[in-house]
Amino acid sequence: MKASHIRKLIKPIESAYSEMFSGRVYRVGKGAVSVRNHSGEALHTVIAVHGFLENHCYFTQAYEEATTELILLTCSNYHIPVNGVTPENPDWEVPIKHLEGTIEYDACILNQALANLPSAEHVRVHGHSRGGAVILEAIRQRPELYEQVEVVLEAPVLPQGRLHALVTMLLEPISHGMWPWLIRLINSAPHSAYGQTFFGKMNPRKKQLLSKLFSATQDHLTIVRNIENIMDWMSRTDTSVYQHIRHGTFLIPAVDRILDRSAMLASARQSPTTMRIVETKAPSHFITLDSKEWIPGFAALPAAAQG
């Protein structure tokens, strides 16, 4: 990448979205892990990994039970979307050797959280979109951590997957130097101009979270690096990565205009039979925001055959 492009791309993006948060926030490398306070004894721990240009608020309304310990990742070089909490540096943090802004880097954040934070016996790791790839990469890096872990991969970026043809068509002509200009254009356009195409039918929560997408990262370089790394990771990662997953669920939307749904399904079908494939009726890539009904109950474990 040209130095002049990098200079343009590292100009900071101001944080535009946060919510009140009650709990502790730990800085881990260039990312963070937030542990929400829970009032009851934790029966379940959920570690959630947000997708590209999202933030951890994607999951907060999906897991509201008092007995659920919710641990939320903030991927590297993303803004931490919390008010009123000062991040602390945990004594269990270890340096990360991968390039920040990559799936490999964020997988290391996830593994440090999983190794040090859950207090419940039943642990679920739930990733949306790019977050699905982060989980698979984390499993590949440290399979021993996942022997008893339930995995939920929602509209996930998968090995041998592809972006939707519409997205590929939009990205192809864009050079690195055009990104800051393009993002300004998107941010100034009325949401309706592109929202319905990519995001499907809107609801209040969806509108609240998805209207702030292009201010989720701390700079434009992270956006470019995320996209290039997602495409690279999908093409070079083999479906053999699935062999270390013990049990869990793929949630596939009925319509997806971000990722190629047929490639996603073909990849998911290479996984062990202890992984369920649920083809939801969700009308968009954002299954959890469309309806919480698709999120598997904690009792639905583990050995249902693939659909």
Image (cartoon, rainbow, N blue to C red):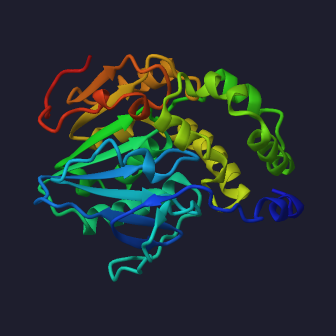
Image check: 186 left or right of 243? right
Which residue is rendered at x = 41% and y = 58% of the image? Answer: 73
Image check: 224 left or right of 142? right
Quadrant of the snapshot with the C terminus: top left
Which residue is rendered at x = 31% and y = 38% of the image? Answer: 152
- Identify the image quadrant of residue 259: top right
Image check: 263 left or right of 119? right
Pick the residue in front: 119 or 116. 119
Quadrant of the snapshot with the N terminus: bottom right
Residue 281 lies, in percent from the top left, at: 38, 16
Confirm whether residue 51 shows in the render.
Answer: yes
Which residue is rendered at x = 48% and y = 70% of the image? Answer: 96
- Identify the image quadrant of residue 69: bottom left
Q: Is residue 92 above or below residue 31?
A: below
Q: Is residue 110 above or below residue 151?
A: below
Residue 114 lies, in percent from the top left, at: 29, 61
Residue 187 lies, in percent from the top left, at: 74, 43
Image check: 74 left or right of 149? right
Mark count: 0
Residue 260 lies, in percent from the top left, at: 55, 23
Confirm whether residue 157 shows in the render.
Answer: no
Pick the residue in front: 99 or 220. 220
Which residue is rendered at x = 68% and y = 62% of the image? Answer: 14
Residue ranking furthest to the right: 4
Q: Is residue 89 above or below residue 197?
A: below
